[in-house]
Image (spheres, grey):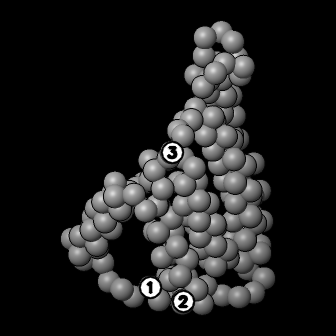
Amino acid sequence: MIYTSILAMIGLVVGLVAVASNPSPYFAAFGLVVSSVCSCWMLAEFGVSFLSLVLLLIYLGGMLVVFAYSASLAAEPYPEAWGSWSVLIYTCFYLVMLIGGYFLFECSGDVKFLFSGLSLGFGIIVSDWGGVGDMYLSANVFLIISGWVLLLTLFVVLEITRGMKRGALRAV
């Protein structure tokens, strides 16, 4: 279990570096998918399987919308791919910064403490579904505010992509 968790952590870091270092939305979308799958994989290994599934569905749906908008606005005939020098320089820079931060904050390589309190049994399922109930019971104000923020975000994105009062029919 520890080896699969380390693999998920490495996939998460590699996906985030791929998103941060790639200026083209066509190729950075793959890194975003990898990082979201690995983060939901980590949540599932910690025993929060329902929340992991819900977040994965929300991530993939949201990323599909964001990728469609960014791909329609960034009409490059020759986008920068993984093999270009600028992407390689950014990737090396971010990896050096990650390794420097690892040594700066004196992180230990031992991740066994993360999994010491886990038990495989009925308690995980109860806490997982109990968290969903708490989300609707005690966090109702947060859900209402989140709904209004998402509605505002929808109007902002529609206003940005509207263009010169021609809607989606404008030439990019």
- Near mark 1 (Cα within 10 A), the count class, few <14, some 14-19 or many ≥20, is few
Q: Amino acid at mark 1?
A: Val
**x, y percent for residue 20:** 42, 54
Few, some or many C-alpha atoms within 10 Å of disc 3 (few <14, some 14-19, many ≥20)?
Answer: few
Mark 2, residues whose alpha carbon is within 10 Å: few (<14), some, or many (≥20)?
few
Q: Which residue is mark 3?
A: 78
51 lies left or right of 25? right
**From mark 1 to mark 3, how far is it between C-alphas?**
42 Å
User: Looking at the picture, does residue 59 appear above or below residue 5?
Assistant: above
Residue sitting at the far front: 77
Q: Quadrant of residue 99?
A: bottom left
- Side of 13 relative to 102 (left or right): right
The residue wearing badge 1 is 111
In the picture shown, does residue 109 fall above or below 23? below
Task: State the image coordinates of residue 50 (x, y, percent, origin top left).
Answer: 75, 66
Q: Residue at x 64, y 79 (%)?
A: 45
Quarter of the figure that contains the C terminus: top right
Amino acid tagged 2: Ile
Q: Tell me the distance, in whole angstroms, between the alpha carbons under discs 2 and 1.
A: 8 Å
Q: Amino acid at mark 3?
A: Tyr
* Observer able to see residue 159: no
- For the point 39% across and 88% down, the residue is 110
Q: Which mark is residue 2?
A: 2
SS at mark 1?
Answer: loop
Is residue 45 visible in the rendered image? The answer is yes
Q: Earlier in the sequence, mark 2 or mark 1?
A: 2
Residue 155 horizontal side relative to residue 22, left or right: right
Residue at (32, 83) in percent of width and height: 108
Q: Nearer the viewer, residue 20 or 85?
A: 85
Q: Residue at x 54, y 55 (%)?
A: 27
